[in-house]
Image: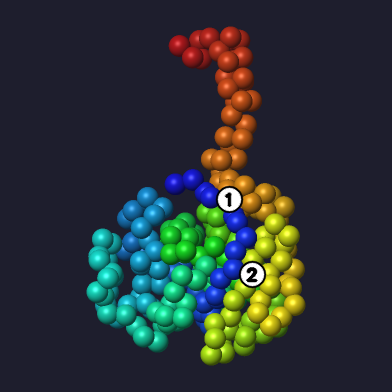
Amino acid sequence: MPMQPFENFSSVVVPLDRANVDTDAIIPKQFLKSIQRTGFGPYLFDEWRYLDHGEPGMDCTNRPINPDFVLNDPRYQGAKILLARRNFGCGSSREHAPWALADYGFRVLIAPSFADIFHQNATKNGILPVVLDEALIDELFTLASGDAPLTIDVDLHNLKLSPDGRAHIEIDIDPHHHHCLIHGLDDIGLTLEHADAIAAYEQRRATEAPWLFA
């Protein structure tokens, strides 16, 4: 499934007040059998979200849920922003973790830090990881802990977040990642931007060295 261009949006924030959330917690190992990139959303945070043991292909509709896990709070249904603590996405480098987050519907992750490989995998799958200092993260958790959910306007084009009750927050992102997210370009999409040049090269090489194309 091709990456979709990142559009500005407004969403409530899911406050996942945990540090060192590893990729096995995001999507447990038994779900890694599939490489389809879709269908992982129902199993996101499976061991925290449900009270039974999940397996691939299970119908999650009637599974017993953990009422204390934040993702099961009705206030956060349909949320596209996840707020977490430091070192989010640590552990194994499985790309299934951002697949599961994206399939659930998350487009923005906010934390003080991310594991390096997870950060790369997230941006390559259309997710914006936003790194903010811990004091600001604490403030956002305070805003999100009120009776009403915290809502944030995300403006990637102008590199800013606008939370309820707070001034704009400027965000920093690598220019290459910014370009890819805005235009919906994964590694394949980036390659296809040069499709004409690739075709011209292949045509030239077929003339120069026809034996390579026999």
Q: Is residue 114 visible?
A: no
Q: Residues within 10 Å of mark 1 (few under 14, many from 20)?
A: some
Q: Residue at x 75, y 77 (%)?
A: 167
Query: Which residue lies most toward the bottom here?
Result: 147
Residue 195, how many percent across, how many down?
Answer: 59, 29
Q: Earlier in the sequence, mark 1 or mark 2?
A: 1
Q: Which mark is residue 5?
A: 1
* Mark 2 residue element: strand
Indicate the secondary structure of the residue bearing disc 1. loop
Q: Residue 118 versus residue 125: which sits nearer the camera? A: 125
Residue 124's label in the rendered image is none
Residue 156 appears in the figure: yes
Numbered badge on residue 153: 2
Relative image position of residue 44 (x, y in whole percent)? 40, 68
Q: Residue at x 35, y 66 (%)?
A: 42
168 or 170: nearer the viewer: 168
CA–CA distance between discs 1 and 2? 17 Å
Identity of the residue drawn at 28% across and 62% down: 56
Badge nearest the viewer, 1 or 2: 2
Left-right relation of 163 to 70: right
* Left or right of 124, for residue 100: left
Q: Residue at x 58, y 15 (%)?
A: 203
Q: Is residue 131 left or right of residue 72?
A: right
Residue 102 x, y percent position in the rendering = 48, 60
Q: Nearer the viewer, residue 202 or 163?
A: 163
Amino acid type of the residue that numbered disc 1 sits on in the rendered structure: Pro
Q: Is residue 212 placed above or below 66 in the rendered structure?
A: above
Q: Is residue 135 above or below residue 162?
A: below
Q: Position of residue 52 (x, y in %)?
A: 27, 77
Q: Are marks 1 and 2 in contact (CB under 8 Å)?
A: no
Assess disc 2: are there few (<14), some (14-19) or many (≥20) residues with their C-alpha within 10 Å of its C-alpha. some
- How many marks do you count on the picture? 2
